[in-house]
Image (cartoon, grey):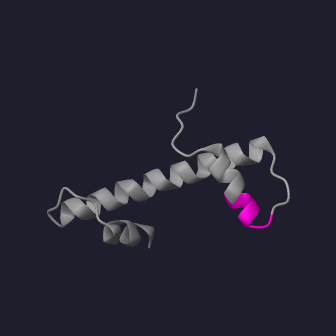
Amino acid sequence: MPKKYLPLAAMETLLKKAGAERVADNAKEALKEVLEEKALEISVKAIRFSIHAGRKTVKAGDIKLAVK
């Protein structure tokens, strides 16, 4: 069973906010998987930036830098 980091309801909300009238369950699951994978990649980069700066705490700037 996959871990639940992001709720499927949030995926439906995002898709509807983007303009979808209806959202299939498999679309919610696909978006969830993609976003969780991308979030993990960003997190790893942000942690590297915080360590490089001599900190144990990840800050918003680290996240923003990791996205670039």
The residue sitting at 62% across, 48% down in the picture is 32
The residue sitting at 45% across, 51% down in the picture is 40
Q: Is residue 60 left or right of residue 56?
A: right
Q: Residue furthest right?
A: 21
The residue sitting at 44% across, 73% down in the picture is 68
Q: Is residue 28 left or right of residue 58?
A: right
Residue 11 among magenta residues: no
Quarter placement of the N terminus: top right
* Observer-nearest of 42 and 12: 12
Please tell me in which quadrant of the rendered image residue 7 appears. Answer: top right
Where's residue 4, x and y in %? 54, 37
Where's residue 61, x and y in %? 32, 72
Q: Residue furthest left?
A: 54
Q: Is residue 40 left or right of residue 26?
A: left
Q: Is residue 66 left or right of residue 59?
A: right
* Observer-nearest of 7 and 63: 7
Where's residue 26, x and y in %? 76, 42
* Observer-nearest of 5 and 36: 5
Numbered marks: total: 0
In the depicted structure, whether residue 8 falls above or below residue 64: above
Residue stretch in magenta: 14-19
What's the magenta bit mostly, secondary-structure-wise? helix
Residue 17 among magenta residues: yes
The residue sitting at 14% across, 63% down in the picture is 54
Where's residue 37, x and y in %? 52, 49
